Image (cartoon, rainbow, N blue to C red):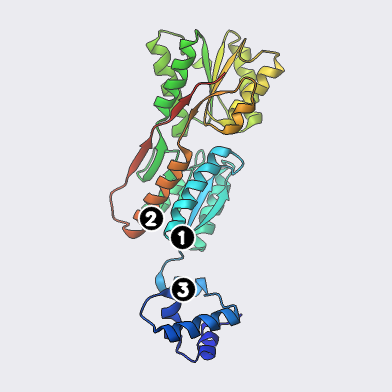
Amino acid sequence: MPTIYDVAKLANVSTYTVSCVLNKSAYVSPELTGRVLAAVKELDYTPNAVARSLQTRSTKTVAMLIPTIGNPFYANVVRGVEDRLRKDGYSLLIGNTYDEQAEQVRYLNLFKARQADAVLLFIVPEGEEDVAKLVSAKRPVVCVGRVPNSFESDSVSANNVHGTQLAIEHLVAKGHKTIAIVTGHTTLSTSTDRIEGWRRTLKKHKLPCSDTLIETSDHTEVAGCEATLRLLDREPKATAIFASNFPLMTGVVRALKVRNLAVPREVEVASSDDSDWLDIFNPPVTTVAQPAYEMGAGAADLALLRIKDNNRPFTKVVLEPVLHPRG
């Protein structure tokens, strides 16, 4: 691999001049700049990022942990993060945890070894302690979507209480009296907030909101299907179900199909998260859309601010979701 010394020798300049040209850190005459760039092109030289990071104490990389890139919601969050970081010359490293604590620990250790300048993440269930250690060690951390309960940090999330209220109000307005909810782990703020929004709305309308109408599970389609089957066995009179996210919603619909219950004639379904592909459902699914792209861009903004000033007060950003009534 060609080095900066090879470039300097071919261009007949000092390594300092090469560095100034490549980093644009000082004025270099057009003639010398042209010689350096010609040598870089001829040698196909690429600056050593590791060596540069040792000098600048920055790798210009930000790491991000998401449950799975296969979920369109997380993919849109990542798109927002990457677009914002690119403007400041940062690159993005991505890891999928599949909501498993062991994977979160493995990736956090990897990101520390790679000296990522900041970490953005959706905390896994039971995984707050691992992240709290990073924050207490003054590592730049931004929690996305899921706000930690046991420690303070920068965070960007959606107003899940209000979003769920919008969905339940929609179902109540359509005449439903027994509305159930299928959600994820109650150790996560997203789940507890959605249950709170569900319960507040039903209490407001003096409708049943007992714990028997709540079913929790892992955030997968299979788990969502199994949870819905348990719910239907316990509460066969439920005429509407609110699902906490994409995979759970598809699990709910699958379970209703297993029980030969027509959607929406016998049981109506609404869901958090949104995507254009939901229009292919017949009828299309009513959703509460979280501003995924904006959440990602906002999280990247907070990460960049934290990198510049690690002593600034923690910032919590809460964005408002939007109801998309469909069939």
Name the residue type under label 2: Leu
Residue at (43, 79) in percent of width and height = 21
**Residue 244 disc label:** none
Residue at (47, 52) in percent of width and height = 83
Q: What residue does disc 1 label?
A: 90
* Left/right of residue 152 with respect to residue 248 in the rendered view: left
Label 3, label 1: how far apart the Cα atoms are? 14 Å
Q: Nearer the viewer, mark 3 or mark 1?
A: 1
Q: Nearer the viewer, residue 83 or 94?
A: 83
Label 1, label 2: how far apart the Cα atoms are? 9 Å
- CB-based contact (under 8 Å), mark 3 and mark 1: no
Instruction: Decide: few, some or many residues near mark 3? Use Cα within 10 Å; few <14, some 14-19, many ≥20.
Output: few
In the image, residue 116 sits, relative to residue 184, either above or below, namely: below
- CB-based contact (under 8 Å), mark 1 and mark 2: yes
Name the residue type under label 3: Arg
Residue 122, x across and y down, in percent: 49, 43
Q: Nearer the viewer, residue 254 or 81?
A: 81
Q: What residue does disc 3 label?
A: 52
Residue 44, x across and y down, in percent: 60, 78
Q: What residue does disc 2 label?
A: 304
| Residue at the limit of the structure toward the front, as seen here | 30
